[in-house]
Image (cartoon, grey):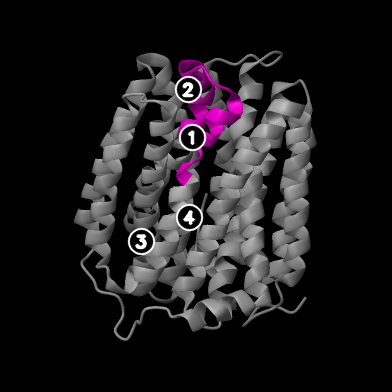
């Protein structure tokens, strides 16, 4: 899923031009290799479940346990980022990421599989958070907006290409080969960062967040609402794009592994619409823009229940577009609503966001098994409605138009 510290400024065409096409592509590719491991395994969930001879809920919990590492890693990196040199931190994190990824290719026991996914999440979170910090520190003005737009685009693209690649490799070469290919991508990402990111230190005067910073964030009602929205968004996203895989492979849809991979072209529209989040905020304000994204996702949910592939795919498109859009808006709001240290506020947000993914996997996994897909979709809808109610707390800040 995409994250930006400047969601209110993302993706103006002039900003894109100011960064340059090559640099935009490099940043997007960096984002892609940083988080491509996060959701790619969801495309091979049915095959993994069969290989481990376990339930959909147990397998989805193992695959999505990387969100535990993402939550912990994002939180810890926000605390310690003032001491970490950006380029080397990202390079080391991506190189270390290749180790658990390669070990997953051995298809260890389900418990070890889960622990390796947690380790992946830790490494991805470090690289992810440090890259966001780097982009905010080395760019200014329109170039900053374009840099975050590029990073968002790469994040959304990883959801599409990662799933497609995982399904294709598994179909042709087996499950073990999937993780070997992604380990190679991790190493290639480390090389890309080493060659394209210049060595830099955190800004002078940056201090380690203290307890008063955390207390201030947790007393900030706008931030608390935003943290809750982030939790609900990934809860819904994980619930949709984890368990819909089992719906796609069973009757009446009965798709094969490669066909499931192609189904994830549903993320393509989101690649085009997510960078428009900033323009939407400027026109509607944060609350109405967030409601627009959440409403789009809610409209797609009934389509997921129909026994028709075009309808299910259309529903997946709407959920993807809506949740990615709402996520970009919610993440950008953190930097504008935080009254103190923004790094620690972002860390709390990321912990809430990925915590929602973990809870969504566990809770909706049980709902899916015990009550079926319709009940799971209902749970997803409840999460989106709660997020919409929380959006009432996103009061106007800074230069946002009054609504």
Number of marks: 4
Is mark 3 in CB contact (under 8 Å) with mark 2? no
Is mark 2 in CB contact (under 8 Å) with mark 1? yes
**Mark 2 to mark 4: distance in Å?**
24 Å
In the rendered structure, does residue 63 fall within the stretch colored magenta? yes
Which element carries disc 4, helix, strand or loop?
A: helix
Instruction: Tell me which numbered mark, 2 or 1, is placed earlier along the sequence.
Output: 2
| Residue 109 falls in image quadrant | top left
User: x, y percentage for residue 62?
Assistant: 49, 34
Q: Residues within 10 Å of mark 4 (few under 14, many from 20)?
A: many
- For residue 63, the mark is 1
**Mark 2 to mark 1: distance in Å?**
9 Å
Which is nearer the eye, 94 or 352?
Answer: 352
Q: Which residue is mark 3?
A: 131
Q: Residue at x 32, y 26 (%)?
A: 105
Instruction: Tell me which numbered mark, 2 or 4, is placed earlier along the sequence.
Output: 2
Instruction: Tell me which numbered mark, 3 or 4, is placed earlier along the sequence.
Output: 4
| Residue 371 falls in image quadrant | top right
In the rendered structure, does residue 123 fall within the stretch colored magenta? no
Q: Which residue is mark 4?
A: 71
**Mark 3 to mark 2: distance in Å?**
31 Å
Is mark 3 in CB contact (under 8 Å) with mark 1? no
Position above or below: 32 against 398 = above
Foreground: disc 3 or disc 4 = 4
The range drawn in magenta is: 41-66
Instruction: Give the dominant element type of the magenta stretch: helix, strand or loop.
Output: helix
Q: Which residue is mark 2?
A: 48
Which is nearer the eye, 209 or 386?
Answer: 209
Instruction: Tell me which numbered mark, 3 or 1, is placed earlier along the sequence.
Output: 1
Position above or below: 289 against 382 = below
Instruction: Tell me which numbered mark, 1 or 4, is placed earlier along the sequence.
Output: 1
């Amino acid at each position: 899923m995409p994250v930006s510290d400047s969601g209110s400024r993302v993706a103006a065409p002039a900003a894109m031009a100011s960064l340059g096409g090559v640099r935009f592509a490099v940043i997007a590719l960096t984002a892609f290799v940083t988080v491509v491991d996060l959701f790619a395994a969801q495309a091979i969930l049915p095959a993994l479940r069969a290989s481990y001879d376990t339930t959909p809920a147990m397998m989805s919990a193992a695959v999505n346990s990387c969100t535990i590492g993402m939550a912990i890693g994002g939180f810890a990196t926000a605390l310690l980022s003032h001491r970490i040199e950006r380029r080397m931190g990202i390079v080391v994190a991506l190189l270390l990421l290749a180790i658990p990824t390669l070990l997953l290719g051995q298809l260890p026991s389900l418990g070890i599989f889960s622990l390796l996914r947690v380790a992946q999440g830790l490494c991805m979170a470090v690289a992810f958070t440090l890259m966001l910090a780097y982009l905010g520190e080395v760019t200014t003005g329109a170039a900053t907006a374009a840099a975050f737009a590029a990073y968002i685009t790469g994040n959304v693209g990883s959801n599409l290409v990662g799933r497609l690649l995982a399904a294709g490799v598994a179909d042709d070469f087996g499950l073990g080969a999937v993780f070997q290919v992604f380990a190679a991508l991790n190493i290639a990402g480390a090389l890309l960062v080493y060659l394209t990111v210049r060595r830099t230190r955190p800004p002078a005067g940056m201090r380690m967040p203290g307890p008063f910073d955390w207390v201030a964030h947790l007393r900030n009602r706008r931030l608390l609402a935003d943290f809750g929205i982030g939790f609900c968004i990934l809860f819904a996203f994980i619930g949709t794009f984890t368990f819909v895989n089992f719906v796609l492979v069973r009757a009446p849809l009965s798709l094969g592994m490669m066909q499931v991979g192609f189904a994830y072209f549903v993320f393509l529209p989101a690649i085009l619409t997510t960078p428009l989040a900033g323009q939407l905020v400027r026109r509607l304000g944060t609350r109405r823009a967030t409601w627009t994204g959440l409403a789009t996702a809610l409209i797609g949910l009934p389509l997921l229940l129909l026994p028709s592939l075009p309808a299910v795919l259309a529903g997946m498109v709407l959920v993807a577009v809506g949740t990615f859009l709402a996520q970009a808006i919610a993440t950008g709001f953190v930097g504008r609503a935080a009254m103190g240290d923004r790094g620690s506020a972002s860390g709390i947000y990321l912990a809430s966001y990925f915590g929602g993914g973990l809870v969504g996997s566990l809770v909706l996994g049980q709902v899916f098994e015990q009550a079926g897909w319709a009940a799971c979709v209902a749970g997803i809808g409840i999460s989106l409605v709660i997020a919409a109610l929380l959006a009432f707390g996103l009061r106007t800040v800074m230069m946002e138009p009054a609504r």
